[in-house]
Image (cartoon, grey):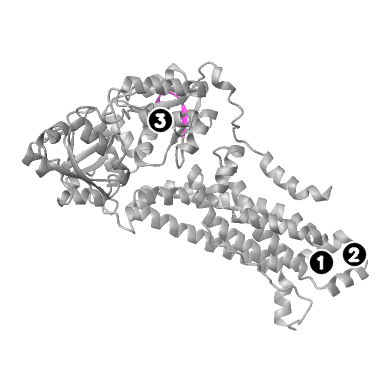
């Protein structure tokens, strides 16, 4: 009897589990629920924090009690979203669709995220629904890969779009991650879709300070970054428009647990952002937090009030 | 600095160049200084909440760890054969990397403070069990014989003779376990319950010097304060060790503080 004590102690330790179990996924068929208390998940990077704060403030105004839980990554928060420990999460349509696709069909599954927003949303909703998740409509804000060149270079060669760069026949070295050589959105796509003469990839990472400095100083001609990068000014860089839609449709979308936050009221509260929040707004808010080190909660409250979304 | 030239918006947004760009504020936050008064004043409540969470997680996990470790150590002392497996098990638990530990416990606890506490309890076991056991083993056989000769039963022997004599070693273990827990709590940040660790991780992501430094310093202060507190408690509950030292330095008959120090500074 006493022999079992260590085992019992461990059991007691684990038995007081309050956690959700992965087995309890019965809510999938449950009708859309409307829980009074909502937990909003953030993935721990600035933009995710900002969006989570916006969601929390808008839901507060709509009469919900909210709390924010910051978790390291999607591997941790997505199961919690399915089980209802987290109720609302800001996501990116194409990336999340591909992630769910890999989770459902294995890592080698053919990607479902694409530059086509409608197709991406359709694929995303088809993957999310069986898991009890509802994807709310996307707005205008997109955080996707983007390419920037120095402002002087753009002026000199009259570049506004990636097509312009392709037509210019300029030889271009790209400061990016080394995976750029293979990824369809990067070197192969730039060559094939835009006819850009890529002479090499300088492996300095995606949107890192070194990568931007390399372009600023003329060692490289173009840098891979994201559309919500707010530090481009600092390095004298401008984005070239992705006019042929090479990049995946990574529109910001709220994803909710249907049985807890699937109500019309939640959708309406969060939907207010859709027509208002732009990619540029996100970039500027990111800058206020990353460069000026303001608090995400303060930054979003001021912005929501400026836009008349928050009283 | 305003964006120069015609800005070319990628698809999805328009009109960046029309908007007025507000000048960045010039304060120690924007300058990203290591020591920044504005950081302290603007984050007072956040820092306070983080410290409180840090203390709660640490205290709870060490207390639960002690409650579990004590009987384990007593059992291991009573039955010699149990000592090997108990020590082996707790040591194996200690070698699991903290990130892996939290991932393993995640399905049981979900994203909760209980997850972090459970992980920390398992880590504290090895330090606590080893040290309590070392303390019990250091009780001289003559002392136990004498107590038995006076008619002490096993329970009374344990409670009034063995455990008090094991206290110095046990307290040493408790101190190491506590300091180690203070630093390990920070890893809980990956699930959003890491006390000051939440701030350290967020600060590292954005290279926020004031936040990383302030939270780290607070972490160290908590560890030092907790250690001093436990030292004080030990001083209060083991008066005989001081009496012994002051008068006749006993050659035997006093439990030696044989703390088993394992790597305490993990994470």
Where in the figure is residue B143, as x and y percent of width and height? 84, 73
**Residue density around tag 2, few if under 14, some if 14–19, many if 20 or more, within 10 Å:** some
Magenta span: A55-67
Q: Is residue A284 visible?
A: no
Quickly name the residue at label 1.
B161
- Mark 2 on the same chain as mark 1: yes
Q: Is residue A165 above or below residue A123?
A: below
**Res B131 quadrant in image:** bottom right
Q: Is residue B185 above or below residue B221?
A: above
* Nearest the eye: B122 or A126: A126
- Mark 2 secondary-structure assignment: loop
Q: Residue at x 85, y 70 (%)?
A: B144
> Seen in the image, is A93 located left or right of residue B85?
left
Q: Chain of mark 1?
A: B
Q: CA distance from mark 2 to mark 3?
A: 70 Å
Quickly name the residue at label 2.
B152
Q: Nearer the viewer, mark 2 or mark 3?
A: 3
Marks 2 & 1, CB-CB < 8 Å contact: yes
Quickly name the residue at label 3.
A98
**Residue density around tag 1, few if under 14, some if 14–19, many if 20 or more, within 10 Å:** some
> Seen in the image, is B260 located left or right of residue A199?
right
Q: CA distance from mark 3 to mark 1?
A: 64 Å
Q: Residue at x 71, y 69 (%)?
A: B238
Disc marking residue A305: none
């Amino acid at each position: 009897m006493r022999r079992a004590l260590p085992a019992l102690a461990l059991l007691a330790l684990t038995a007081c589990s309050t956690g959700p179990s992965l087995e309890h996924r019965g809510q999938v068929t449950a009708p859309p629920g409307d829980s009074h208390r909502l937990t909003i998940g953030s993935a721990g990077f600035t933009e995710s924090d900002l969006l989570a704060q916006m969601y929390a403030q808008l839901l507060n105004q709509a009469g919900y009690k909210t709390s924010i839980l910051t978790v390291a990554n999607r591997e941790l928060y997505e199961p919690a979203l399915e089980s209802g420990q987290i109720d609302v999460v800001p996501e990116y349509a194409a990336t999340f669709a591909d992630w769910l696709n890999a989770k459902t069909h294995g890592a080698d599954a053919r990607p479902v995220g694409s530059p086509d927003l409608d197709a991406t949303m359709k694929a995303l909703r088809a993957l999310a629904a069986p898991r009890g998740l509802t994807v709310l409509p996307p707005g205008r804000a997109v955080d996707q890969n983007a390419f920037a060149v120095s402002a002087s270079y753009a002026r000199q060669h009259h570049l506004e779009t990636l097509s312009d760069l392709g037509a210019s026949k300029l030889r271009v070295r790209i400061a990016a991650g080394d995976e750029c050589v293979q990824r369809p959105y990067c070197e192969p796509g730039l060559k094939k879709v835009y006819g850009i003469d890529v002479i090499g990839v300088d492996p300095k990472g995606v949107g890192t300070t070194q990568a931007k400095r390399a372009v600023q100083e003329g060692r490289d001609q173009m840098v891979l970054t994201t559309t919500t990068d707010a530090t481009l000014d600092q390095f004298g860089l401008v984005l070239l428009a992705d006019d042929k839609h090479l990049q995946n449709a990574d529109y910001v979308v709220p994803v909710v647990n249907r049985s807890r936050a699937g109500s019309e009221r939640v959708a309406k509260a969060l939907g207010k952002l859709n027509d208002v929040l732009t990619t540029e707004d996100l970039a500027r808010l990111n800058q206020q937090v990353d460069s000026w080190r303001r608090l995400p909660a303060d930054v979003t409250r001021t912005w929501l009030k400026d836009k008349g979304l928050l009283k | 600095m305003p964006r120069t030239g015609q800005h070319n918006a990628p698809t999805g947004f328009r009109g960046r160049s029309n908007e007025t760009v507000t000048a960045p504020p010039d304060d120690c936050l924007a300058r990203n200084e290591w020591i920044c008064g504005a950081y302290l004043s603007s984050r007072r409540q956040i820092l306070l909440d983080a410290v409180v969470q840090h203390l709660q997680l640490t205290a709870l996990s060490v207390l639960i760890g002690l409650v579990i470790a004590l009987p384990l150590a007593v059992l291991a002392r009573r039955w010699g054969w149990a000592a090997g497996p108990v020590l082996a098990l707790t040591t194996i638990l200690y070698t699991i990397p903290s990130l892996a530990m939290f991932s393993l416990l995640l399905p049981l606890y979900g994203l909760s403070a209980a997850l972090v506490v459970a992980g920390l309890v398992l880590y504290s076991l090895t330090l606590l069990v080893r040290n309590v056991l070392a303390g019990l083993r250091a009780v001289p056989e003559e002392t136990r014989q004498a107590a038995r000769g006076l008619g002490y039963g096993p329970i009374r022997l344990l409670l009034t003779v063995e455990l008090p004599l094991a206290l110095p070693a046990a307290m040493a273990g408790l101190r190491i376990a506590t300091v180690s827990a203070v630093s390990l709590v920070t890893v809980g940040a990956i699930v959003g319950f890491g006390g000051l660790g939440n701030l350290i991780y967020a600060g590292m992501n954005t290279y926020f010097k004031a936040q990383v430094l302030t939270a780290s310093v607070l972490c160290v202060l908590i560890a030092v304060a907790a250690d001093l507190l436990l030292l004080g408690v030990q001083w209060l509950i083991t008066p005989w060790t001081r009496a012994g030292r002051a008068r006749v330095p006993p050659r035997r008959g006093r439990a030696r503080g044989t703390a088993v120090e394992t790597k305490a500074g993990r994470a």
